[in-house]
Amino acid sequence: MNRDKTIISEDNVYRNTVMRRFLKHKLAVASTIFLAIILLCALLAPVLSPYSPDKVVGGFSDPPSVKHLLGTDQVGRDVLSRMLYAVRISLLVGFASTAVSTVVGVVLGLVSGFFGGILDMVIMRFTDMVMSFPYILLVLVSAAIFRPGLLNIILILGFVDWPGIARLVRGNVLSIREMTFIQGDRVAGMPKRYILFSEILPNTVAPILVYATSVIAISMLDEAALSFLGMGIQPPQSSLGNMLNGAQSISILTSKPWLWVPPGLMIILLVVSINFIGDALRDAFDPSGN
Amino acid sequence: MLKYIIKRILVAIPVLIGITIIDFLIMTMVGSPLELLQGPRVSQAAIETKRIALGLNKPVYVQYWIWLTNLLQGNMGYSMKSFQPVSQMIKTYIGPTLLLMSVSLFVSMLIAVPAGIYSAVHKYTPQDYTVVTLSFLGSSVPGFFLALVLIYIFTVRLGWLPSSGMYTLGAQKGALDVVRHMIMPVIVLATSMAGTNIRYIRSAMLEILRKDYLRTARAKGIGRFLVINKHALRNALIPVITVLGMHIPILFGGAIIIEQVFSWPGLGMMTMSAIISRDYPVIMGVCLMSAIVVLVANLLTDVIYALVDPTITY
């Protein structure tokens, strides 16, 4: 009974330390608040957006006005409403594809690091192969092969971006499995399943979380780039990238900044704030830091 | 040492073979060159003849073997669109890409090394936070958006720089002309790379500034400048080699989008137009070539790393 209590309080101490270190990063705290607001707006997009994102509600390319706060696009759709829905898509792609790549990477990394031997060699060589192809090139080729669309983009980004996580997890497992508490588990005859999932995995969560944050940021950038090139999210569905697509034409670039500046700034703000949070998490989890 | 290099090369060989297999499988999976022949005026028999002529009736592993032996002789197949040999096309377009990539890499290091050191030396001061914040901003701006902003400012508003191509049409080809066309793409590519590099160099430098031998150097009283620029920087440059190696695939990728935006006549633009027109032999040729370049670059990185770091023994 007593033992349980101390474990819980130790957990709390650790959590408090992490929290305290994270709160020291003012930019990260501001980013978290900003992200929370944006997330809320994205979730409430159907309620918040003044117009339907796909309906023609105004003139062609009207400049911002009281009626349309960010103006209307080339076919008369409300830019603000489209952007709210676009943020939704971008965040969804960022989180979902990261979830896919994290699961794939963690499983392969755990197996590779824990079991070692031939299995490890095969998995790591395969990781090397995938990593040798330039990431964007693989994504573009896959996007050309499969029909572009929301689900496919998530799967493509997820299945191309796992090698980094796999390597990270493997490295961590390799160092943790030599530690005394794992040796103790082995001596005590604990089942492998228990050692792997209840002892090793929890101890690699922090670095995985930090890495995953940067993957979210990268995935969102890649979705934007793909959609910008017309190979990602397809219109009429809006994404921050395909809203920028129109700016490739010189007349929009020069005389209709309301069509491309807001989505561009939105991508930057989202990615920057995710990166700040990731950086603060790295510091907060770092056992050597203070 | 030599043993280590040989070991690394031996490990790279199966990876190389794997790369060719993946590349070949994707290419055969996605589309058959026979699709191009389809049409009302093409008979079934003609397609069959062509299938046999192209060797497509053979089992996949035989096809792979034929493809591989052709590859080793420098034959990467033919474009489905222009019917040019792929190797020829890569040769034509690779020059501008290499130029763009190397200049961008150089410029990004030119920014990142001093900024990273400055940041590490002044750690936890407002200056440090400014540099780190800027570096985050640099790596978070989508390249194509920065490109649009630059085009808006320097081409549309100010009219200083050309927004596309490598040479001015009709003008005499000169180095200055190329430089003017290169400024904006280089800024875009270097910004994102410098963003990440600053943080790598900063943390490498911070690590080294804590080392005992630096305390000794400081205690000797040789002066701050020598301590930082001689004792610390040299050692901090070792991890930078890894960073450089890591950037090769990112550069290849970044070049595709940036070349497309700026119509830079390089490999990226060629690849993008091949992707749009589904010219698979060209796409997979570029994939294969870049994968091999990346593999060799990683190999070289490891070897150089082992050469310059005296503490690593094998």
Image (cartoon, grey):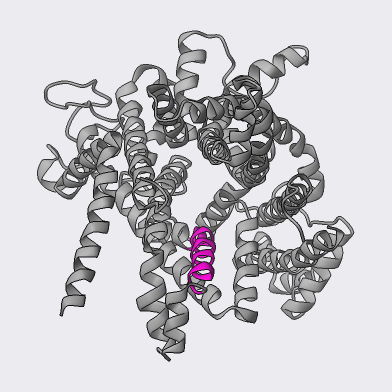
> In the figure, B92 relative to B242: above or below?
above
> In the figure, B27 relative to A17: above or below?
below
> In the figure, A136 relative to A73: above or below?
below
Of residue B208 and residue A274, the one placed in the foreground of this image is: B208
Q: Quadrant of the N terminus of chain A?
A: bottom left
Q: Residue B63 vs residue B202: left or right?
A: right
Q: Residue furthest left?
A: A47
Q: Residue at x 78, y 12 (%)?
A: B172
Q: Residue A261 vs residue B176: left or right?
A: left
Please tell me whether residue A173 belongs to the stretch shown in magenta. Answer: yes
What span is in magenta? A159-177
Q: Residue at x 35, y 69 (%)?
A: A202
For residue A280, say whether it is visible.
yes
Q: Position of residue A163 (x, y in %)?
A: 54, 61
Q: Position of residue B229 (x, y in %)?
A: 65, 25
Q: Residue B3 vs residue B32: left or right?
A: right
Picture quadrant of residue A273? top left
Picture quadrant of residue A101? bottom left
Q: Residue at x 59, y 21 (%)?
A: B224
> In the figure, A269 relative to A138: above or below?
above
Q: Position of residue B132 (x, y in %)?
A: 43, 31
Of residue B113 and residue A123, the one placed in the foreground of this image is: B113
Of residue B135 and residue B42, the one placed in the foreground of this image is: B135
Q: Residue furthest bottom?
A: A189
Please tell me whether residue A231 belongs to the stretch shown in magenta. Answer: no
Of residue A179 and residue A226, the one placed in the foreground of this image is: A179
Q: Position of residue B221 (x, y in %)?
A: 63, 23
For residue B42, say whether it is visible.
no
Q: Main secondary structure of the magenta part?
A: helix
